[in-house]
Amino acid sequence: MQNKITNSFGLLAIAFVFLCAALLNNVLFDKVRVDLTENQIYTVSNATKKLLQDIDEPINLYFFFSDKTSEGYTGIRNYASRVKSLLEEFEVASNGHINLQIIDPEPFSESEDKADEFGLNGVKLSAAGDSLYFGLGGTNSLDDRETIAFFDPQQESFLEYEIAKLIYKLSNPKPVQISFISDLPLEGGPNRMTGRMDPAWAIYEQLQQLYQVELLEKENAAIPEKTDVLVLVHPKNYDEALQYAIDQYVLKGGKVIAFVDPNAESSPSAMGISSRSNLAQLFKVWGVAYDPEKIVVDAESGLEIHLPNGGSGRHIGYLGLSDNNIDREDVTTASLELINGASFGSLSKLEGSKTNFEPLVMSSVHSSLMDSSKYTSSAKDPQALLTEFQDANTQYTLAARVSGPIKSAFENPPEGIDPASHQSEADNFQAIIVADTDILSDRFWVNRNNFFGSPILVPFANNSDLVTNIVENLSGSVALINIRARGRYARPFEVVDQLTLDAEAKFRQKEQELQARLKETESKLSDLQTQQGEGAALVLTPEQESTIEAFLKEKIEIRKELREVRHQLDKDIDALGTVLKFINIAFMPCLLTLLLIFVARQIRHRQVI
């Protein structure tokens, strides 16, 4: 009886300790997280934490996901769980500044109306089915609204960045200010070649629609303090005062986009005169090596162009850059498919520089550098360029992100500027440099059509998307810019995939053998029928019958081999699955049990001693 009472008290004591531990865990360790995934996909990055720390007003986030409607769609539900977990991490890391609400917008409910208010459109899963909502809405204290219309699983690696960008826009609702300094006629104007007025460049017009844009005079060295992004287009002959203004702008936290070119073919310069641009003095302290006398020619990425004689040919100086040339890990270039440009220069990291140099756009490996003088003399003759081309088997950087610590290009400010205002160094320099200006020109990415008197832009390349993405990225905080692509929630079965690929390779090989033998047999039959001569009876000879019979036997044997290959594939995959099941279901529990038994015996042994 006494043992029963003792055991009961022991069980009650264990239950009491468990409840106390659970309460302490909820109170003291509520914000503690342990993320054991390979790429830390459930943990917000340090850059995101810095962005969340800078929030000074409450942000309301509304995560809309159709939980009931999505039943049966395992992939979407798993990804929704991943999004929900990350949003909860944002809420925890915000120190109370973010209020997250999870909403299931059921059909004909107030929650569905709220999703519609944010402009979220449900996706029809079937012709008669309900709509699936899977997006995010956010508001700030001023009732400004930002949304992510739909979380695309294909863009999972940028999930953290997209959520952080939405929060940044709500916490910093002021419009983005872009200041341009350009040696090219972005606003259009009189064309000396045609005698007509040219319209403003389409990229410039689109940026004006999205942001507040100001075109600065090169002679005016002052850069407005409200400038979020400074865009330098074809910089030539900048005087000391202007270079100093740019130098101090970036040292005090300003961001720069620089378009330089060893041969700006869209420049209104006189015919035959090479139009080069450079920022040599500033590039030196920014850690960028660039030679305005060298042009990248690329035998693989060259575009097909119309020739003056009416034909067409590949121009190795006019480049169409696609999937293999574009960085898929940077948010500014990840979604782009094609970028067109002409006479690109080459960028690289300056030896000894402390800045980070990240290529965004590259040439193919079948490229080389050509002297700009030789290039300009042959630019109108693609065949002449091909004759001069010598493959260096080198990939060149055509656009790059540069960041990190820099020092001023000037030991002292120019005369007339207060030395006390001079900034000598900075830790968070941010710039994107593109070694071409022609990508901004309409003829390389867009067609202008006329629709009942109204101009319609029809893009055929992503040049404008590239520029817009860069501006949007650099206009954010340093923390937002530093958020990089993360790992994916869904992990592929790499071993299974490899087994499948190997088996399919064997299957295709056998199939090709069958087709080859079939063709050979049909050829023999055709020859035999030809030998019979015209007018012969349509009766198979013994030789033909023997050939067909042999072929049929051979065909049956090969089909058996094909079935065996497929069977072996399934057998290998099933064997792998059996091993994994054994490890997960039997081996690991047994191992843990044995480990606990060993620990318990060690404890008892010490108590006896």
Image (cartoon, rainbow, N blue to C red):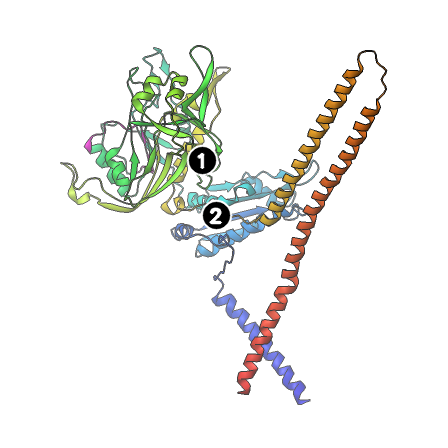
Q: Which mark identifies residue 486?
A: 2
Residue at the spot 44% in from the left edge and 10% down from the top edge: 309
Residue 152 in view, yes or no: no
Q: What element carries label 2?
A: loop
The residue segment tinted magenta is 226-240
User: Is 243 left, or right, of 85 in this rendering?
Assistant: left
- In the displayed structure, does residue 44 sit left or right of residue 492? left
Residue toward you, 336 or 456: 336
Which residue is located at x 28 percent, y 18 percent? 273
x and y percent of residue 138 in the render? Answer: 49, 45
Residue 486, compared with residue 463, is above or below; it is below
Q: Nearer the viewer, residue 449 or 567?
A: 567
- Contact (Cβ within 8 Å) of mark 2 with mark 1: no
Side (left or right) of 474 relative to 574: left
- Give the labeled residue for mark 1: 326
Choose between 289 and 220: the one closer to the eye.
289
Point out residue 216 in the picture as x, y percentages from the top left corner: 28, 29
Secondary element under disc 1, as helix, strand or loop, is loop
Q: Main secondary structure of the magenta part?
A: loop
Which residue type does callout 2 highlight?
Answer: Arg
In this rendering, position of residue 399 left or right of residue 502: left
Instruction: Tell me residue 53's x, y (percent).
Output: 39, 53
